[in-house]
């Protein structure tokens, strides 16, 4: 957890809106209070950081709409002791929120396929004081088997179908939240729970629009 001392004006606006939109998990709301979204967007877009919309962060990637970020975080039902994998660090904003929910010595492992974004997120998270995150520049579409199994997996880009490799790396009882669908088409945010060695439960949540998951296990060329 980062030593953030003050709640930014942007964070206050976001939290009030999230409460109005139905986010109820108090730990998630406190995480939003502590993470300054304006630090994770390009300087020229900082005036829009409190808007409830995705913003461009370069390299064809975006920082997701705050409500979607909050709902994805909420449905993982993190207690603070889980082993967590994030696929697609992007700006590092979602990574920071997850880190707020996982006090040390627990670590958020985040994989980012764009080297420049991985380096930028790693630097910013360090500047903000996060010591319980590990951002690796790597193709995350197939997960990272040597660090699993994971109690929670959050995927921040959409494959056309759920990668089997990610399901295989869920621990029994584990949860994965992932947008699924074609690039530029209808996508659905899905929650998957592993109920046994061979069985999973799928819950459709709501329609979303994410960038495509790239890499060998995604829907586009590496």
Image: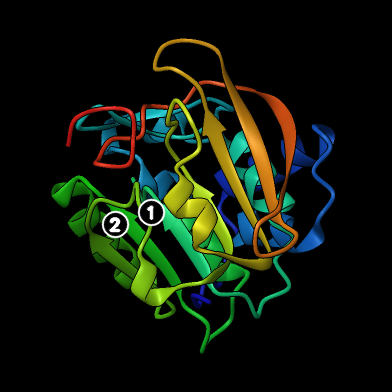
Q: Are marks 2 and 1 in contact (CB under 8 Å)?
A: yes
Q: Is residue 92 above or below residue 202?
A: below
Q: Can I make out residue 151 in this image?
A: yes
Q: Quadrant of the C terminus?
A: top left
Q: Can I make out residue 35 in this image?
A: no
Q: Quadrant of residue 198?
A: bottom right
Residue 136: percent from the left, percent from the top? 25, 64
Label of residue 92 in the image: 1
Query: Residue 172 vs residue 117: left or right?
Result: right
Query: Residue 172 vs residue 135: left or right?
Result: right
User: Which one is nearer the viewer's eye here, 74 or 43?
Assistant: 74
Q: Quadrant of residue 221?
A: top left
Q: Quadrant of residue 77?
A: bottom right
Q: Is residue 61 above or below residue 38?
A: above
As helix, strand or loop, the secondary structure at mark 2 comes to: helix
Seen as rendered, the residue at the extreme top is 185
Tell me the residue that label 2 is attached to: 121
Q: Residue at x 22, y 56 (%)?
A: 138
Measure the C-alpha gap from mark 2 to mark 1: 5 Å
């Amino acid at each position: 957890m980062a030593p953030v001392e003050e709640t930014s004006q942007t964070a206050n606006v976001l939290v009030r809106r999230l409460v109005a939109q139905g986010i109820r998990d108090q730990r998630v709301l406190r995480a939003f209070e502590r993470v300054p979204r304006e630090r994770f967007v390009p300087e020229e877009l900082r005036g829009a950081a409190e808007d409830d919309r995705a913003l461009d962060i370069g390299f064809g990637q975006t920082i997701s709409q705050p409500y979607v970020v909050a709902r994805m975080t909420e449905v993982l039902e993190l207690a603070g002791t889980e082993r967590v994998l994030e696929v697609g660090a992007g700006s590092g904003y979602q990574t920071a929120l997850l880190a707020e929910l996982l006090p040390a010595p627990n670590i958020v492992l985040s994989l980012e396929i764009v080297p420049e974004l991985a380096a930028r997120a790693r630097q910013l998270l360090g500047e903000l004081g996060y010591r319980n995150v590990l951002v690796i520049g790597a193709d995350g579409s197939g997960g990272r088997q040597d660090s699993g199994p994971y109690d929670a997996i959050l995927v921040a880009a959409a494959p056309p179908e759920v990668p089997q490799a990610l399901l295989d790396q869920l621990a029994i009882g584990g949860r994965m939240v992932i947008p699924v669908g074609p690039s530029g088409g209808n996508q659905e945010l899905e929650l998957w729970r592993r109920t046994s060695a061979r069985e999973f439960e799928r819950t459709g949540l709501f329609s979303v629009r994410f960038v495509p998951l790239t890499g060998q296990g995604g829907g586009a060329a590496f």
